[in-house]
Amino acid sequence: MAEIANFKVSAAPHQDSGASTRRIMLDVLIALLPCLVCGVLFFGLYSLLLVVLSCAACFASEQIFNLIRKKPLTFDLSALVTGVILGLNLPPRAPWYLPLIGGVFAIVIVKMLFGGLGKNFANPAATARVFLLLAYSTAMTQYIGADISGNMLSADLVTAPTYLGGGTAALSGSFLGVEGYWGNVLQMLFGYMGGSIGETCKLAVLAGGAYLIFRRVIDWRIPAVYLLTAAVMVLACYQSASEILLQLLSGGLLFGAVFMATDYATSPKWTYNRILYAVGLGVITVLIRRFGSYPEGTSLAILIMNLLVPVMDHYILPVRFGQLTKRGRPKPAVMVWCMRGLCIAMAAALLVGVPLVQYTEAPVRGGTYSYVSAVSRNLDGSYKFTVKGGAYIMDGYTQQLEFVVTLDGAGESVEDVEPVTQSTMGYTAELSFFEGQSYEDILARTDLGTDAETSATKTNTALRAMVLECFCWYDYNVAGYEEISYAGSENIVRAERRGDLYRFTVNGIADLVEYDYKQQLSYAVTVDAGTNTLLYITTLTESTFGYTLDKPVFLGKTEGEIAAMTEGDIQADITTGATVTNLSFQGLAQTCFDAARRLQGGE
């Protein structure tokens, strides 16, 4: 006892790390700096203004609240961190008032009303973003493409799709000289694409995350397990190995995993609870993306899991030092081993599942598609297409359509058509017209009428064009053709053969005299030499002004039927000039038929 009396016992903590709230927040601000710089570089000075307004709103809201409550002013930098994160989560051309509204909501409603720093029930920035999405959904989903030179001083809203909203059509298909899938991955990694201000450049996010881990500001387990879980969920929900990287590098998943999910106040205290928390984040994020009406799910997933953290920390407690079971044995750390086992199982699932799941990225060879926005290959070998478009029903009403179309592995018939978005006025498609039907059956179907009073015929017509484009995509990107030589026409730059099918890459010009505009045309055209029928058309180069080929006019037609067409037969909307494109293609189709006939005859 005398020896114990020589020691002075103080309250915990017994070891001081030297860390303070201000130092930690300063580290976070430093880590966010690369994202801010890249955002301003890609999207312009107006984006910087939005972040500054967000920071000003957050800082001022905190100080005014303290003044009203007669509390000391706080300068711990936490409000600035919230402001920067919220600002970086906004679209580059969001209205100036959104960061002000979001900043006030984040600080006053989410943070200060619950006691201030460390007592908020959820991440303020994530919650404010969800609030803005609900209150201003249109403004919060208007994005622009990255443009170092063109965006710097411009505040104009020139919308561009993101990968989550537009699939690979939102990407350039090549980046830094790399084509196809890996070009898309590189483009996402460098962030030269549409998206929120700070979430696009993943290299900047990774640099900030590495800095925070090095400084021991965040627990690396949360972002690591979050990404691992999301990868497994993508593999399961999308049945696509290559979709894993595209999903992880798209939207705000990586940004949220590093800067929002790791918030001290709203993440669990114990290590295994943090792993469980990260697993929940990954599951919810991918489920929202895959099955929800909104393509992004990171902020909402963080908000949901934040609400569960108090329950987890209250009921799932660590084993105390020396704690025994009822039998007097040391109590095993069950949760620790369960979480370790779960992580090992997910990693094993990726190692086993990725080689088994094949995925064909659209476009593989190229091509421009009016309706196909995403393509994946299922485990059974079938191909799943996400197709989007519109159907003009009546004056003043064009309904937006989205379907998931599944073709069999041989690209011969439709296995399933699943509606995603259709009319709310009863103009719904008759799926039996397409499900279980072969390509030839759909080509031959001309009666698409259902209930004339609902104008569903026009919906069926639009869906028919979408389904036909799926088959054309398959023919150009998947079906195996052997290249052959042919020099019988200067318009044909490439010839390929698969049995009686001949596929030609053919070039031409549509001369729109009334607009003093000549557009370059290039198509991949497949004809069946046995039946002398035009089967598939894929657009390679076409107008950027809407003068696009009306493909269903020609698909499934014989050489004689196409030759006998008059301008009245192939006339489209004269205001778009597409009739001239159709007339030009009529001549190109004749060239392809002539080439197929010559090649079939051995010439």
Image (cartoon, rainbow, N blue to C red):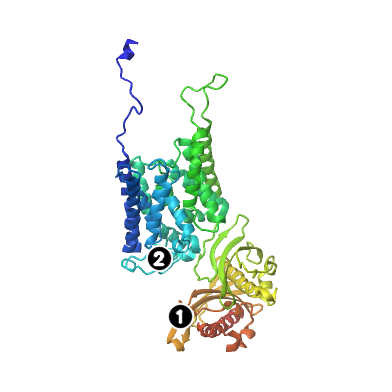
Place residue 71 in its image quadrant.
top left
Name above or below for residue 73 compared with residue 87.
Answer: above
Please rate how many residues cluster around mark 2, counting C-alpha atoms within 10 Å: few if below 14, some from 14 to 19, many from 20.
many
Question: Mark 2: which secondary structure?
Answer: loop
Q: Position of residue 151 (x, y in %)?
A: 34, 67
Q: Amino acid at mark 2?
A: Gly
Q: Residue at x 32, y 10 (%)?
A: 2
The residue at which mark 2 appears reads as 145
Quadrant that contains the N terminus: top left
Q: Residue furthest top?
A: 2
Label 1 environment density (alpha carbons within 10 Å; few <14, some 14–19, many ≥20):
some
Residue that label 1 marks: 520
Q: Is residue 488 above or below residue 538?
A: below
| Quadrant showing the C terminus | bottom right
Is residue 234 among the parts visible in the rendering?
no
| First along the sequence among labels 2 and 1 | 2
